[in-house]
Image (cartoon, rainbow, N blue to C red):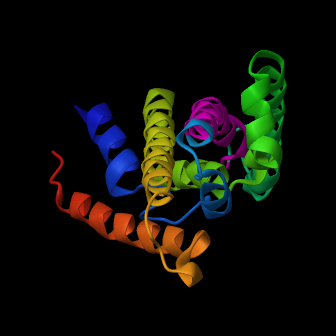
Amino acid sequence: MEYLNIFIKSAFIDNMIFTLFLGMCSFLAVSKTVKTAVGLGAAVTFVQVITLPVNYLLNKYILAPNALVDGVDLSFLTFIMFIAVIAAIVQIVEMVVEKFFPALYGSLGIFLPLIAVNCAILGGSLFMQQKEFSNVLEAIVYALGTGIGWLFAIACVAAIRERLSYSNIPAPLKGLGITFIVTGLMAMAFLCFSGIKLA
C-alpha cells in the first residue's frame, strides 16, 4: 500500500509538470503531436527509472555524511554526481533511440539530448533525496510515478494541441499562447488531486 501511495502522489498530486512546473521547455516544444510527445515522455520515464535508484544508492552509500568514513561528508558533491549519472544514462538512451527508432530520433531532434538538462530529471533525484526513502524500491516507485506523470501530462497536452489545430483560434493566441492557457487549465484541474487522502 505504501508503494501505491508513493506512485499516486508522485504521478498526480506532485506532478512534475502541472504541480511543480519542472521540465517545461521540452514539454512546450515537443507537445505538438502525440507521437513525439509519447516518445519523449517514454524516454524521460526510462531515464527517471534508471537514474533515480542509482542516485539513491550514491546518496545513501557514498554522499551521505559518515557513509564511507566516519567524519567525512561528501554531500557537497551531490549535484555533480547526480548530473553525471543523468548525463551518462541520457547518452545511452540517445544512442538506443537513434539506432532502433530513427524516425522518433529525427522528430525529437535536439530535445532528446536535452533530457540531460531537463530539470524534471534532476528535480526527481533531489526530491528523492529530500523525501529520505527507506529503501531503493521506494525510490524506483517514486521514479516510475514521476516519469509516468510527466508522460501523462505531455501526452494530454499534445492530444489537446492536435485537436486545437482544427479550431478557429485567434491569431495572437496560436502556437505557444494557447498552449500556455491549456497548460494552466490542466494545472488547475490537477489541483483536484491534492484533495486525495492517502493512507
Quarter-wise, where is residue 60 in the image?
A: top right
Residue 100 located left or right of residue 40: right
Q: Is residue 166 visible in the rendered structure shown here?
A: yes
Residue 51 located left or right of residue 131: right
Residue 163 picture location, percent across and down: 43, 53
Q: Is residue 73 visible in the rendered structure shown here?
A: no
Residue occupying the far top of the picture: 100
Q: Residue visible at 82% across and 41% down?
A: 87
Residue 127 picture location, percent across and down: 53, 54
Q: Main secondary structure of the magenta part?
A: helix
26 shown above or below 151? below
Residue stretch in magenta: 38-65
Residue 141 located left or right of residue 175: left
- Quadrant of the snapshot with the C terminus: top left
158 shown above or below 144? below
In the rendered image, residue 56 lying in the magenta stretch gets the answer yes
Quarter-wise, where is residue 173 in the image?
A: bottom right
- Quadrant of the snapshot with the N terminus: top left
Residue 74 picture location, percent across and down: 77, 51
